[in-house]
Structure formats: C-alpha cells, structure tokens
Amino acid sequence: MVALEAIGIDIVDIPRFEALISESRSFLTRYFHAEEQLLNSTSLAARFASKEALFKAGASIYPNIFNQVLINFDSYGRPYFVIQKGLELVRLGNFLVSISHSKLTAVAIVVKLI
C-alpha cells in the first residue's frame, strides 16, 4: 500500500517570471540545471514551480541546490525528478509531480509518498 506523506504546490506568473530571467542571468544558473537553461521561458516557469513544490512537499533539498534537480519525462510523457549526484543523475522515486501551464501561469503539484 502506498501512503501520502506530504503535498506541495506552486504557481508562477509567466510574464513576471520572464521579466526576472531577462534581468538576471544569475537567476538561471542558480535555479536551473545546465540542460534546463536552454528551454523557453514557459518551460522554465513550469520547472521552477515544480522545484518550489518539491521543496514545499518536504524534499531534503535546499534552494541553493535547485540547479542540481531537473525534470525528465518517461516514455508516456509523465514528468519525474532527477538529481545530479556527481556525474550521475538519480531519480527521486518517492515524489510524484504534475505540471501544467497556460499563456500566463505555470503550476505544479508534488506528492511525497511514504
């Protein structure tokens, strides 16, 4: 039986996020893995919401290592978290994530399983 331990949710205003990333290159390097930094602003906003939701769901990561956490997708298009440990990417298996966006907002919810 799978049990739920915690939930985290975050929403990002995309125009505000776009203004932030255009003003601060250091924001990109601080919060996004090198692979993610190549994505468009809508995808980045969705990933930022995912990382914030992961933190709120009680992941033992800290905002100063957000650039080591990234989102991958399985063969069905479902997102999941991986974290870079040395040269390896390791899946965070006890977290489920759902991401969505419109033209103006990106939202993510993360469920931590026991």
Image: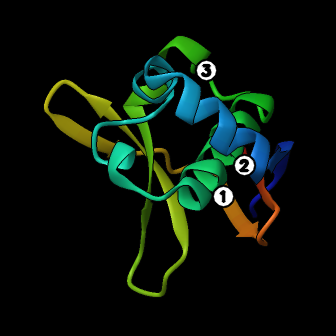
Q: How has the structure been colored for display?
A: rainbow
Residue 74 shows up from this direction? yes
The foreground one among 77 and 103 is 103
Can you say which quadrant of the picture contains the N terminus? bottom right
Q: Which residue is mark 2?
A: 113
Mark 1 → mark 2, Cα distance in angstroms:
8 Å
Q: Are marks 1 and 2 in contact (CB under 8 Å)?
A: yes
**Label 3 to label 2: alpha-carbon separation:** 14 Å
Choose the circle earlier in sequence order: 3 or 2: 3
Task: Return the x and y of residue 57 as percentages of the image width and height.
Answer: 78, 36
**Which is nearer the N-term, disc 1 or disc 3?**
3
Task: Count residues near mark 2 (Cα–Cα under 10 Å), then give few for <14, some for 14-19, many for 20+.
Answer: some
The picture quadrant where one finds residue 75 is bottom left
Image coordinates for residue 76, horizontal then vertical, percent: 47, 87
Q: Residue furthest bottom?
A: 76
Q: Mark 2: which secondary structure?
A: strand
Mark 2 belongs to which amino acid? Leu
Label 3, on which residue? Answer: 60
Q: Which mark is residue 96?
A: 1
> Is tag 1's residue or tag 2's residue first in the polypeptide sequence?
1
The residue lying toward the viewer, choosing from 79 and 42, is: 42
Tell me the kind of residue under disc 1.
Leu
Image height of 95 relative to 77, above or below: above
Q: Is residue 9 above or below residue 57?
A: below
- Across and down, in percent, residue 104 comes to 82, 62
